[in-house]
């Protein structure tokens, strides 16, 4: 799903076909069932850790193959949109520029400051190591004015300076995946100024003109193999040993009491190391079997509701409670998902007759008057070829949406034309260019209204017109 070492949040709603085979699960005994549940429970945190290692194993911001890498507790910023030549990550984004930061608050809080964006839409979702969005400063929740927060760890009991609002993270390590609305290339300079207003500093350095510390580089960490592939290929006892170490600084959520009790039945106690070498050959075989069955279950999982030829993910996105399998599915398909209240991503791979899309045909997406996506942010529709990449086209358009100069029909309705060849200069305003062969389309709904969140509004079926 992810090439090179780009963090998998950029895939977001890849909704790829299952990675592993999906035969019927073999019968598991009691210990194997607990082992499978433990693997599913642990999977998101282990994937988070391998992703963290892949993107922070640098001495300074911007180092590494992706250009998005940065040491711990330092922001990195995407500075421009990719084009059709970009192949580092599938389903790239042509709506927002990203600002990312991995944080460690095990020793002291990290002060997060946001300068006034002057009304520009942004969001800074803060994820714990379980992949739950614990807070999301941004236009929807906190407005666009100056803001200052202190991200504090689970054991912090100190005092904060007046005027700094605490955000308690239940884990010592976490991830910020910021997004700033970007209205095309001409908007880059303005967005770069906004990105410069996202700053962090350890509490002990806050308010001081202190240069960021150099990052440390661990030569034993794999920064070339995609994180997801690393985790899926990880030997089972090594997987659980890493998980046990992560639990020392990133404890279970309070609602995980039942799962923690089960973990103890197979020798895993939060806060203590897991000694895989102490397992008998029979126990190791059982744990391996459990892990394989867990991977099959995760890879077969669904991300959302199928309706009108679209897959729409709304429920339990970005926060999962005890829905451990759903959390693992989302992590595998697109690590770092937003809360549905911030963004919903309908994906369509078939037309109104259930047939796969092909650029040899012409399609129309028709919105009756008053039925455009009900969002308070903005919306777009992005085209991807069969490799889930942008499509080269004569007008350089990879997505179309409400920030474009769309031409309405006389009755106030809207038709988006989807085809390979130009529909003619007089219709190009509403044209989303398609490749010659197979493709699919992803809609992005930022700050969706209640009608989207409750399923009252759904995207219209895509009609083939030839």
Image: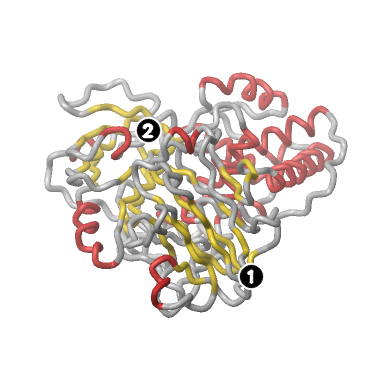
Kindly report the distance in space between the C-alpha atoms of the residues bearing marks 2 and 1: 47 Å
Kind of element beneath mark 1: loop
> Residue 111 location in percent, x, y?
24, 37
Residue 339 in the image, given as x and y percentages of width and height: 45, 38
Q: Quadrant of the N terminus?
A: bottom right
Q: Could you tell me which residue is drawn at 45 percent across and 68 percent down?
A: 431
Colouring rule applied to residues: secondary structure
Q: Residues within 10 Å of mark 1 (few under 14, many from 20)?
A: few
Q: Which mark is residue 16?
A: none
Mark 2 and mark 1 lie on one chain; the one further toward the N terminus is 2
Is 34 left or right of 73, judged from the image as shown? right
> Which image quarter holds the C terminus?
bottom right
Looking at the rendering, which quadrant does residue 69 occupy?
bottom left
Vertical order, 230 against 269 (above or below): below
User: Which picture quadrant has residue 2?
Assistant: bottom right
Residue annotated with mark 1: 466
Query: In front: 190, or 311?
Result: 311
Determine which quarter of the picture holds residue 437.
Answer: bottom right
- Which residue bears the numbered disc 2? 135
Q: Which residue is painted at 80% across and 37% down in the image?
A: 283
Asked whether 252 or 24 is in front, the reply is 24
Residue 399 shows up from this direction: yes
């Amino acid at each position: 799903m992810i090439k090179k070492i780009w963090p998998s949040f950029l895939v977001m709603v890849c909704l790829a076909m299952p990675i592993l085979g999906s035969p019927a699960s073999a019968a598991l005994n009691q210990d194997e069932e607990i082992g499978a549940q433990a693997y599913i429970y642990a999977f998101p945190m282990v994937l988070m850790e391998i992703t963290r290692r892949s993107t922070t194993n640098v001495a300074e911001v911007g180092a590494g193959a992706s250009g998005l890498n940065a040491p711990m507790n330092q922001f990195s910023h995407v500075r421009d949109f990719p084009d059709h030549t970009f192949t580092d990550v599938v389903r790239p984004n042509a709506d927002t520029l990203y600002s990312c930061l991995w944080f460690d608050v095990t020793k002291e809080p990290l002060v997060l400051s946001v300068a006034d964006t002057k009304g520009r839409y942004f969001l800074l979702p803060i994820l714990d190591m379980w992949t739950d969005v614990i807070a999301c400063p941004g236009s929807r929740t906190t407005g666009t004015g100056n803001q200052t927060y202190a991200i504090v760890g689970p054991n912090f009991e100190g005092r904060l300076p007046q005027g700094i609002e605490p955000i308690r993270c239940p884990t010592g390590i976490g991830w910020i995946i910021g997004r700033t609305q970007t209205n095309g290339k001409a908007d880059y300079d303005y967005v770069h100024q906004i990105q410069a207003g996202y700053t962090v500093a350890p509490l002990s350095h806050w308010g001081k003109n202190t240069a960021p510390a150099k990052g440390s580089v661990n030569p034993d960490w794999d920064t070339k193999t995609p994180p997801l592939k690393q985790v899926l290929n990880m030997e089972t006892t090594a997987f659980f040993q890493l998980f046990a170490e992560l639990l020392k600084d990133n404890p279970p959520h309070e609602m995980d009491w039942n799962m923690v009790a089960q973990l103890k039945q197979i020798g895993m106690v939060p806060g203590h190391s897991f000694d895989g070498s102490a397992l008998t050959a029979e126990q190791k075989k059982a744990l391996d079997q459990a892990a394989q069955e867990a991977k099959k279950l995760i890879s077969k999982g669904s991300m959302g509701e199928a309706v009108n030829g679209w897959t729409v993910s709304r429920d339990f996105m970005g926060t999962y409670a005890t829905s451990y399998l759903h959390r693992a599915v989302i992590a595998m398909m697109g690590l770092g998902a937003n809360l549905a209240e911030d963004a919903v991503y309908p994906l369509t791979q078939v037309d109104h007759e259930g047939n796969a899309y092909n650029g040899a045909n012409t399609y129309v997406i028709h919105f009756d008057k008053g039925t455009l996506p009900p969002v308070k942010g903005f919306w777009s529709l992005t085209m991807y070829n069969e490799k889930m990449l942008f499509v080269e086209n004569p007008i350089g358009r990879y997505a179309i949406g409400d920030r474009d100069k769309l031409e309405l029909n006389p009755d106030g309705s809207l038709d988006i034309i989807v085809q390979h060849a130009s529909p003619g200069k007089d219709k190009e305003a509403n044209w989303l260019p398609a490749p010659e062969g197979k493709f699919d389309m992803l809609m992005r709904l930022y700050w969706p209204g209640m009608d989207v969140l409750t399923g009252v509004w759904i995207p219209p079926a895509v009609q083939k017109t030839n």
